[in-house]
Amino acid sequence: MRFIRLGLAGVVLAEAWSSNEVLLGFLGVILLAQSLLNLGCCGSSGCDIDHTKSKHSSSNNSAEEITFSEVTKTMKTKVVVDNLKCGGCANSIKKGLMSFSEVSEVNVDTETDTIEVTHLDDFEKKKIKDKLYSMGYPEKGTLEGLDKIVTGAKSYVSCAIGKLSKEEEEEEEIKK
């Protein structure tokens, strides 16, 4: 880089001398000083790379491990549902929604009938509502009549399965 500046300084100074341009001559002097004093736009060492740290040091043979992680955008979706009664319901809902690979966390509040799902940003919210509906937990106020009775019956079955699953998990933890 120094030699390029030196050559450019010579050309600029020659042109400034022949055309009697003071500003061009001043630019030539700056380029000449930069090349002779190894000064650049980046400080006293120019644009030089620090070579004191060798990439292949003989005294240190350990390889530095570099890990990469994928950055993903997540969002939370809250759904208020009908037919949510107890911890068995909550357990079934958690298992059902966690079956989606895009879902990372499910929180169920049985007092407010609210389900909060943390999922990837591009995951369709309709899939969450459809899964909840298929398990007997439709979005609050969306059903009437026979549909409401049918989903109520489904929720009792889901609740019972959730209670049994929870009891089996607790028994396995006790055995451990």
Image: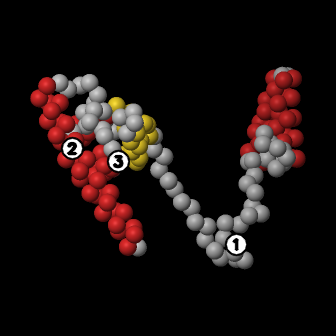
Residue 111's spot in the image, x, y percent? 40, 36
Name the one closer to the observer, 68 or 171. Answer: 171
Residue occupied by mark 2: 156
Q: Residue at x 87, y 35 (%)?
A: 29
Q: Earlier in the sequence, mark 2 or mark 1?
A: 1
Residue occupied by mark 3: 87
- Say how the picture is coloured: secondary structure
Question: In the rendered picture of this protein, how many numbered marks are placed on residues?
Answer: 3
Task: Report crowding for label 2: few under 14, some 14 to 19, many 20 or more residues within 10 A (C-alpha).
Answer: some
Q: Which mark is residue 57?
A: 1
Which is closer to the viewer, label 2 or label 1?
2
Mark 3 near mark 2, Cβ–Cβ under 8 Å? no
Q: Residue at x 23, y 25 (%)?
A: 142
Identify the element where label 3 is drawn. helix
Q: Residue at x 15, y 33 (%)?
A: 149
C-alpha gap between disc 1 and disc 3: 59 Å
Mark 2 near mark 1, Cβ–Cβ under 8 Å? no
Horizontal side of 38 relative to 125 (left or right) equals: right
Q: Earlier in the sequence, mark 3 or mark 2?
A: 3
C-alpha gap between disc 2 and disc 1: 67 Å
Q: Residue at x 71, y 66 (%)?
A: 54
Mark 1 near mark 3, Cβ–Cβ under 8 Å? no
Identify the element where label 1 is drawn. loop
Horizontal side of 107 relative to 60 (left or right) equals: left
Residue 157's spot in the image, x, y percent? 19, 47
Q: Earlier in the sequence, mark 1 or mark 3?
A: 1
Residue 105's spot in the image, x, y percent? 41, 47
- The residue type indicated by label 2 comes to Tyr
